[in-house]
Image (tube, rainbow, N blue to C red):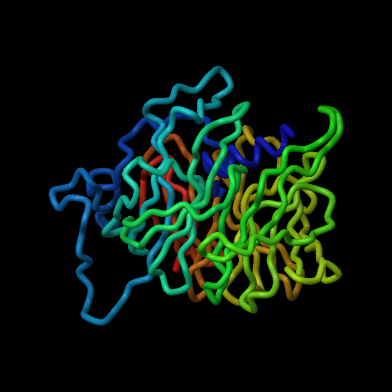
Amino acid sequence: MKCITAILLLLILIVGCSPSGSAAINQPQSSAVVDNKTIPPKQNTEVTPDSPQGDRVVPAHESGQMPSQILFLRIDFSRSTPNLYGRYDLTSVNRDIWVTDSDGKNALNLTKSSANAMSADWSPDKSKIVFDSVNSYLQGLPVCSINIMDADGSDVKQVSPGASSRHFPAWSPDGNRIAYSKYVPPNCGPEIWCKSFTLFTFNPDGSDDREVQVLSGGSNILPRWFPDGKHIAFLDNEMRLSEIWSADIANDSDLNKYNIDSNPTYITWFSLSPDATKIAYSHDLSRDYYHTGRGIFIFNTTTGETTQLTKNDYADDNPCFSPDGKQIIFASFGDTGETSGMFIMDINGSNLKQISSQYGDMPMKWR
């Protein structure tokens, strides 16, 4: 149960779409908002609600062209104080859903602290956003519902049925189903490892709720759809180890475990490339959520080759692929504005570029 809690906290804090360096341990010492004072002139300026343009910005792009955008969470730690171990009181932080152009411009707060979300995903046509919202806390764990809103943050509706806690929603490629992880209270003692998160799918209106019959031994979180809409990759957590699996949502006999070099270990977040031939993931060599040194890796599902892309003294997490699969955005948790925020790089680790210096920015999806 401790390991399950750590994974959840990881995604909330992104040490861990946190991405994923080390967990969010140290509060940044420099300004959190990207501007021309903290980012070199060659970098782009982020528009925030505090800027003169306000928080509703019309992108300056040519008519008929739609830039690629990044959906991300912004975590505000200003009301939370870390304890001696660097852990934050998660019940006192704000988590908002933001969207920005892939160059870091035209950042827009969609929820304005009304959601306290943990994860989010676009519908295939980008007209809607599905997200989980923290309703309360139970023994330190967030109790979440699943909601859908328009892409501009309006018309928010709760779609998850019942009062159970549901997390990490992901929209299917055809837009007809949403996969998520449901928390089911384990019926076992504290010394016995229990499967407490199970994969489900339902229609976007919350109807036809079905369990995905996965017979792996651990808790199943972070569902990721394959392009065919029939398979889902997910993170399986058992006995403090994490493994990435895939399964046919209608046929458990098609269950597959990826033989990643660092598997099993402490994988905190992962995403699939658009063609599902690569997996980007964050890996903590220490197997401890609160240790430093978490890096970004790429696993090639065709060749079985694993490549480490980042390696430093702080946490890199939440890697997400660009729409063409040629770049990755990830979060970094350093101790300055130059080492914190969101960064973009090529999938070979070259051409690193910072697009945000906000400590606690967590990319969820690049589309």
Query: Total marks drawn?
Result: 0
- The answer to whether one can see residue 340 in this image is no
Residue at 50 percent across and 40 percent down: it is 134
Looking at the image, which is closer to me, 250 or 355? 250
- The answer to whether one can see residue 221 in this image is yes
Q: Quick check: 108 left or right of 7?
A: left
Residue at 38 percent across and 70 percent down: it is 68
Looking at the image, which is closer to me, 87 or 316? 87
Please tell me whether residue 26 is drawn above or below residue 124 in the rendered image.
above
Q: Where residue 147 sits in the image (x, y, percent)?
A: 47, 53
Q: Quick check: 180 left or right of 192?
A: left
Q: Where residue 209 sits in the image (x, y, percent)?
A: 64, 60
Please tell me whether residue 129 is drawn above or below residue 265 in the rendered image.
below
Residue furthest bottom as drawn: 64
Examine the image and state in which quarter residue 275 appears.
bottom right
Residue at 51 percent across and 63 percent down: it is 205
Q: In which quadrant will I find the C terminus?
A: bottom left
Q: Where residue 14 sits in the image (x, y, percent)?
A: 53, 43
Examine the image and state in which quarter residue 351 appears.
bottom left
Please tell me whether residue 141 is drawn above or below residue 164 in the rendered image.
above
Residue furthest left as drawn: 52
Q: Quick check: 54 left or right of 349?
A: left
Looking at the image, which is closer to me, 69 or 207? 207
Q: In which quadrant will I find the N terminus?
A: top right
Examine the image and state in which quarter residue 230 appears.
bottom right
Residue furthest top as drawn: 84
Residue at 30 percent across and 55 percent down: it is 107
Q: Where residue 317 sits in the image (x, y, percent)?
A: 55, 49
